[in-house]
Amino acid sequence: MSQDLRVFLEQLEKDGEIKHVTEEVKREYEISTLMMALEKEHRYPVMWFDKVEGSEFPVVTNILGSRERFAKAMGVKTENISQEFGERVKNRFDNLKVVENPPANANLITGNDVDLTKFPILKHFPIDAGPYITSGLCVAKDPETGSDTCGFHRLQLKGKNKLGISFHSRGRMWEYFRRSEERGENMKMAICIGVHPNISLGSQASVPYSLGKFGAIGGLFGEPLEVAQCATIDLQVPAYAEIVLEGEVLANVREPESPFAEYTNYACFRSTENVFQVNAIRYRENPIFHDITPAMSSEHITIISIQREGDILKTLNQNLPNIKAVHSPLSSCGIFHCYISMKKIAEGQPQQALLTVLGMDHHIKMAVVVDEDVDVFNEQEVLWAMATRLQASKGVMILPNCMGETLDPSSDELSRSDKMGIDATKPLSGFSPKIEIDKEAQEAVKRLYKYTK
């Protein structure tokens, strides 16, 4: 399987999933406004903008905008994407494959010639503090163990060679920087723009701190991740990245960064206020600048949802039998709610599932368990089960003042959040039967569909 984003985009082009905009668009607001309009229409094409004001490079967005696209990248059925993710990230390939002359070596800019403004870095919404790189995959190493990590962090354009960056507090990158700063050292870091969807998805994998992310990403490809050495720092990055920014996060330096339109669909003023100094830029010939529309867009959220579902399925299957499906819906920003369907064979099993899920992930604020006859990917069915199978005094548990998500605007000043577990399953016996459609009639009436069109 090719690990090159360009090969993947070529296939999407053949499949008719890419729409080209040939007229010039502005850097401010126009692209994100169009993408949010398509979002409301539940349309998720890859949009390719050939001409962006003030830049010679195109912008491509919504590459990660649907489950179908992630499934295509992994070569699996869409309905199996979360389970496949959870299984594949366990099948690590820690022996990386080194590519000696990666495509990004075609252009190298260093020193005073570094100029980020040549790239079409967009300002997405009026609330944003400035233009932001939203698809920057940040790569660094633990200064103590040497384990690699990579993840997406918002990057505010502050100057020709300077970006503001906010680390997800209490996350892996934040911890690696804390360890570097404690030693009085800047943290060497590279930022990759334009990588294969499997790399983007694999970067979200939950792995032990002692293990690197690159090995888990290889699991999604079913082979070692192909990497290349940076030109100016001792880091390896995905070999086929379109653009690579090399530099360091400055120790003991903080500057205002925010507000930013976060995935919660609210402006976020919280920030770790770190500063990334860009010392070198490498990029491919005719580089493709990938932009992710921020706020509550499918491209911003789907990747989170798939990762959460895969991790939750993996954990539940270790503790309980008969788990059927898990869904983290778009309506909960892909992160705050979780729906679980199971075949209940003993009373108390839903509560065990709820405690497992609420305890394994500090982001999840509400978990709902339903019976196997409820499709958790159809939110109307989940709400129906809650309406007809739930009595709050018996089926709801509330856990106050738990560790929560910093970007949740409803969390308190210490990022604490209440959690709620809901058992919306039927009792094992004595409950009204659900209305079923006759199977033979269901087949027979297919001949009548022509009259409904």
Image (cartoon, helix red, strand yellow):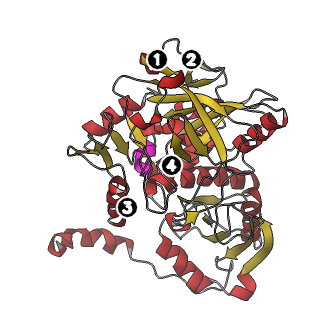
User: Who's the residue at 71% across and 74% down the image?
Assistant: 420
Query: Range of the magenta residues?
Result: 63-71
Give amino acid for label 4.
Answer: Asn
Q: Is residue 53 above or below residue 143?
A: below
Q: Nearer the viewer, mark 4 or mark 1?
A: 1
Q: Earlier in the sequence, mark 4 or mark 2?
A: 4
In three-dimensional space, the C-alpha distance between marks 3 and 4, rounded to whole angstroms, equals: 27 Å
Is residue 314 visible to the viewer in this orientation of the structure? yes
Residue 255 placement (x, y as % from top left): 66, 48
User: Who's the residue at 70% across and 46% down the image?
Assistant: 254
Q: Earlier in the sequence, mark 1 or mark 2?
A: 1
Q: Is residue 254 above or below residue 419?
A: above
In three-dimensional space, the C-alpha distance between marks 3 and 2, rounded to whole angstroms, equals: 38 Å
Which residue is identified by label 4? 80
In three-dimensional space, the C-alpha distance between marks 1 and 2, rounded to whole angstroms, equals: 8 Å
Which residue is identified by label 3? 36
Which residue is identified by label 2? 231
